[in-house]
Structure formats: C-alpha cells, structure tokens
Image: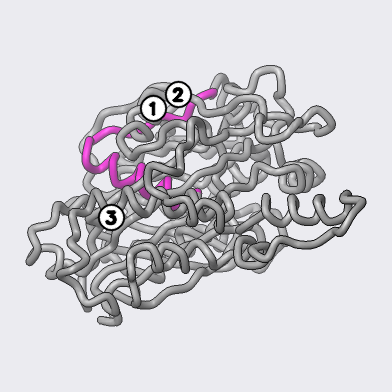
C-alpha cells in the first residue's frame, strides 16, 4: 500500500489569513470572536461569531471567479491557492488526471441561498433569480471551481458529513492515493455559514453560546460554565501526495498520514452517544490502521465544541481509548477559532501538523474551572501553550447525524 504525506498547507481563519498567522495566533491563544458584522444580529439570542477578517479575495481570485462564486467557494479558492503555492508543485510536471480535488463543506452556499430568496420575495417588481443562483449555492461547487482554476482533471467531488466533512474529505483523498488512483489531491474544507438562517437555526437548537457581552470568552470547551459553541468560518487546505512522488520532486514534507477511520454513533440526530462508543471505536480503528499504540500518541486536537454534552462525551471516548495516558496532551482549539463546521477538520488537521513541526501544543483558552465530570488523569492543556516533543498527533471531527472521523499524523 502506498504512503501518503502532506506537502502543502493553506489556511483562511478567524485568527489569520495565512497558515503561519493562523498558527502563531493559535499558540498565543488569541480569540477570533466578536459581535457579528455580516448582518445585524440584534434580533437573535446569539449575536457573536468568529468571522474571517480583512478578507481580500482579489489576492488569489480574478473578477469572474469572485462574481460567480459564493463566499464559501471564495474561501476554498483562496486557501487552495495558498496550499498549492506552499507545496512548490509545478503542475506542468504532473499529468492533470493524476491530481484531484476532494473538498468538503457542511452548508455550501448559504448566503447565496438566503440572499436570492430574500430578493425574490421582497421585490415588488419583476422578481427573478440570478442565473448563477444554483451553481453558486451547490455544495460541490468549491471542489469544481478549485479544479477549474488549476486544470486538475483527476477525481473530483464533495463528501458531506456535517462537521466531520473535511476530515472525511482528507481520508477519502488518502485512500485514493493509497489505491494508486491518484498521485496527489488538494483537499480540505470551507464554510461561510455566519448568516441569518444558520445563526438563527443553531440558536433555535440552543446549541450556541449567548455570552454576547463577552465574545472572546464565549467558546470555552471543558469549562464548567460553558453554554454552547461559537460559530466560525473560513477554510483549510492540504496537499496530500504519494510519498515517492513527493520525494522524487524534492518536496518539503510536513507529516505523513498514517491512520484514518470513520464510524457512526447510530444514536441521535444532534447529540453524541453519551459514553462515546462510536468516537472511541473510531480512534481505535485509526490507531490500528497506523500500527500505533495509544501510549505513542503525543497530542490530540479534540473536536470539543464547548457544548455541555459533546465535550464530556468525547472525553469519555478518549478515556475509553487512551485511559489516563501521561503522554497524551489534549487541547480544543475551537476555543480560539470558534467552530468552523464543515471546515473544522481541515483547519484542526493543520494545527495538529504544525504542532508536530514545532513541538508545541496550542492551548484551550477560557478554562477557569474544569468540568468535574472530566475523567481523572487527563492531560488537558489550558490557557497557555505547552512545549513537548510531538511525534504523533491525532485530530477528531464529529458531526450531526452521528458521524465520527479521526485522522492520525506522524513526523517523518
């Protein structure tokens, strides 16, 4: 079976519009949260989010790409362009049918959908839909437009598994390379869901924080006073490449992908299994695929979103898999970035890889008092980054519908 490595990274996040800025602000524990500016949030219970700031699509996109794409696709094109640039891959040296795009998004073109319906139903004269309405809205269009931008003619599609989506995209790309179906993939995910419909819908589920008077303190995984997640937006892109192909072209290699797994909770539409049965099995399967014992994992970026049930269920799953491992240090970087939904797995995979490269565990911020239901002996990194040797890192992403996904990265 072929080996798969990461040779390019690209990030557009609430705390940085480049991979390096994103990493440095994560280590510093700089929150990306603030009052929503994309629309007037005054009528909503939740009025805060982690928005992308100072976004200039023209840096990587031309006028037609901007005009014909939803914001989530613009985020994808931006991050993918960074990633390909970072990889140093000369596309003229590779058969375009040997490189594909597998790109995820949980919601797709939400802002396009909402804007078009609002325009149609509120106009008093000649109401009509924009001819780009459907293509801009489609959840697979980011994948399609990334392939068009760079002329990539290999495997191209979009998996959707809610907030596990971009992890799913990554592992699909890994498996196609292992099977010899491609030499490389641009993969990851993007989300631009800070819209009235999305904020209103999640607020109706009572899943979101209402700490509107103190937004930078609102996302607080593991803390006893957490009251829900804070929505984020942005994109994360990885260039995955067959190991021998990467070595032959002299590519810099960030890490090797050594294990992936997916399971289902088969329990509830929106709540995780309280004992973390599906999540624990997912982590175990990824370890088994990698041939790695639980004691060898140095760092885990947890999915932990800052919800009351979700954080404890995942910690129960981690404890079931790892016990009170003295080596495993844990953090939840959604405390810093907010929850990027379908893009969460990709941006957190980037942080797991950077943690390996720099031997630093980024912190979980806003932890004043740990929830007393947390299993004893867990090494949770709170408020300040922690330096340690990191050889193997795990990244989890879970989604509504009971979707569980785990990816393991190793230093090379």
Q: CA distance from mark 2 to mark 1?
A: 5 Å
**Above/below status of 21 relative to 170:** above
Q: Is residue 135 above or below residue 122?
A: below
- Which residues are the magenta region? 344-366
Residue 257 location (% of width, % of height): 28, 61
> Mark 2 or mark 1: which comes first in sequence?
1
In the picture of the structure, the residue carrying the numbered disc 2 is 30
Rendering quarter of residue 6: bottom left
Query: Whole-Å distance between the Cαs marked 3 and 1?
Result: 23 Å
Q: In the picture provided, is 84 more to the left or to the right than 161?
A: left
Residue 286 visible at all: no
Q: Residue sitting at 23 percent across and 65 percent down?
A: 241
Which structural element holds mark 1?
helix
Q: Earlier in the sequence, mark 3 or mark 1?
A: 1
Few, some or many C-alpha atoms within 10 Å of disc 2 (few <14, some 14-19, many ≥20)? Answer: some
Q: Is residue 403 above or below residue 395?
A: below
Q: Mark 3 sits on what residue? A: 84
Does dot 2 land on a helix, a strand or a loop?
loop
In the drawing, what numbered circle is on residue 25? Answer: 1
């Amino acid at each position: 079976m072929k080996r798969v490595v990461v040779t390019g990274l690209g990030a557009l996040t609430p705390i940085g519009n480049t991979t390096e800025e994103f990493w440095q602000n994560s280590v510093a524990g700089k929150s990306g949260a603030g009052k929503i500016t994309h629309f007037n949030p005054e009528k909503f219970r939740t009025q805060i989010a982690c928005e992308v700031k100072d976004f200039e699509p023209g840096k990587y996109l031309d006028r037609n790409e901007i005009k014909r794409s939803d914001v989530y696709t613009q985020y994808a094109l931006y991050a993918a362009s960074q990633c390909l640039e970072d990889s140093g891959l000369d596309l003229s040296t590779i058969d375009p049918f040997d490189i594909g795009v597998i790109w995820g998004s949980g919601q797709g073109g939400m802002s396009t959908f909402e804007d078009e319906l609002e325009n149609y139903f509120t106009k008093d004269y000649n109401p009509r839909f924009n001819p780009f309405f459907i293509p801009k809205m489609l959840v697979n269009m980011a994948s399609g437009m990334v392939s068009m931008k760079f002329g990539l003619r290999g495997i191209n599609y979009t998996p959707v598994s809610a907030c596990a989506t971009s992890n799913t995209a990554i592992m699909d790309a890994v498996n196609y390379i292992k099977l010899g179906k491609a030499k490389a993939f641009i993969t990851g995910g993007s989300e631009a869901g800070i819209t009235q419909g999305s904020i209103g819908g999640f607020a109706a589920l009572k899943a979101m924080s209402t700490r509107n008077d103190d937004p930078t303190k609102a996302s607080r995984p593991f803390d006893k006073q957490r009251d829900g997640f804070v929505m984020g937006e942005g994109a994360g892109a990885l260039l995955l490449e067959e190991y021998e192909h990467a070595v032959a072209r002299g590519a810099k290699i960030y890490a090797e992908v050594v294990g992936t797994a997916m399971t289902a909770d088969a329990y509830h539409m929106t709540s995780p299994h309280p004992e973390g049965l599906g999540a624990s099995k997912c982590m175990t399967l990824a370890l088994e695929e990698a041939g790695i014992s639980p004691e060898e994992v140095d760092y885990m970026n947890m999915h932990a979103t800052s919800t009351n049930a979700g954080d404890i269920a995942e910690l129960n799953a981690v404890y079931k898999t790892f016990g009170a491992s003295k080596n495993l240090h844990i953090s939840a970087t959604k405390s810093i970035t907010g929850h990027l939904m379908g893009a969460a797995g990709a941006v957190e995979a980037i942080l797991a890889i950077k943690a390996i490269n720099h031997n630093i565990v980024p912190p979980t911020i806003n932890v004043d008092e740990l929830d007393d239901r947390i299993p004893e002996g867990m090494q949770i990194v709170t408020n300040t980054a922690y330096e340690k040797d990191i050889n193997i890192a795990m990244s989890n992403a879970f989604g509504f519908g009971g979707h569980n996904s785990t990816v393991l990265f190793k230093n090379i």
